[in-house]
Amino acid sequence: MFDPTVFDNLKVAIENYAYDLDNLDSTIRITHRVDRLEMAIMSRLFALRFTLADSSDLSAELQLEASLKDLASELLAVEGENPACTLRLFFHMPIENVDRQCAQVEAIIQDIWQPEEPPVQTLSFAYGQQIPQYSNTIELAFQRKINEDQMEDIPELLEHMVKTLSALLTVSEI
């Protein structure tokens, strides 16, 4: 009988709540999903990207990762190890005024998430555009790993992501 790992249990819980927000509540629209076993380094990655149901310019992405060490410590029941996964959040949005809008983005992230470390904003643009529009990828990383003890926090996590997308929408419209 297959015994699911912490990664599998968290992935299913995230999927269930996210797809409820998509299919039942029509709050979000899931646009991309990744469920990968990286054979070269024996790691797992689950990613889910979504937009607000009524807006497609901005997107949020949740990534759940389990390294070989994470998976092995659980499967081999290594004493003193606490099986857990890495959680990272990304928000993707177009911006035109880098200084003003990036500062607003940072303020929104600080207000909603109150992270221990500031978010990392990575800007890129396509060369040759008449009016340069930047693509801003905002990464929010967490200091600690998560496990099944945080399972009940998943609805609040996704609700915060939806709240963040709504707030970021006001930045892109300015």
Image (cartoon, grey):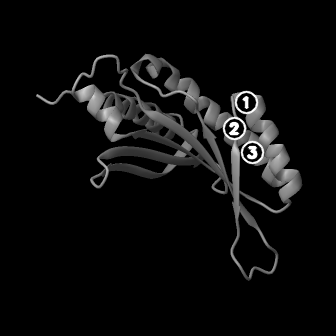
Going by the numbered disc 3, the residue's amino acid type is Leu
Mark before the other along the chain sequence, 2 or 1: 1
Q: Which mark is residue 112?
A: 1
Disc 3 to disc 2, how far (Cα)?
Answer: 6 Å
Q: Residue at x 62, y 36 (%)?
A: 161
Q: Is residue 87 left or right of residue 10?
A: right
Label 3: which residue? 168
Mark 2 secondary-structure assignment: helix
Mark 3 secondary-structure assignment: helix
Q: Residues within 10 Å of mark 1 (few under 14, many from 20)?
A: few
In the rendered structure, are the residues bearing label 3 and label 2 in contact, judged by CB atoms less than 8 Å apart? yes
Q: In what quadrant of the picture does the N terminus appear?
A: top left
| Image-quadrant location for residue 163 | top right
| Image-quadrant location for residue 109 | top right
Q: Residues within 10 Å of mark 2 (few under 14, many from 20)?
A: some
In the rendered structure, are the residues bearing label 2 and label 1 in contact, judged by CB atoms less than 8 Å apart? yes
Figure check: 145 above or below 89: above
> Which of labels 3 and 1 is toward the front?
1
Going by the numbered disc 1, the residue's amino acid type is Ile
Q: Is residue 94 left or right of residue 22?
A: right
Label 2: which residue? 164
Disc 2 to disc 1, how far (Cα)?
Answer: 7 Å
Going by the numbered disc 2, the residue's amino acid type is Thr
Q: Residue at x 28, y 17 (%)?
A: 79
Figure check: 150 above or below 174: above
In the rendered structure, are the residues bearing label 3 and label 1 in contact, judged by CB atoms less than 8 Å apart? no
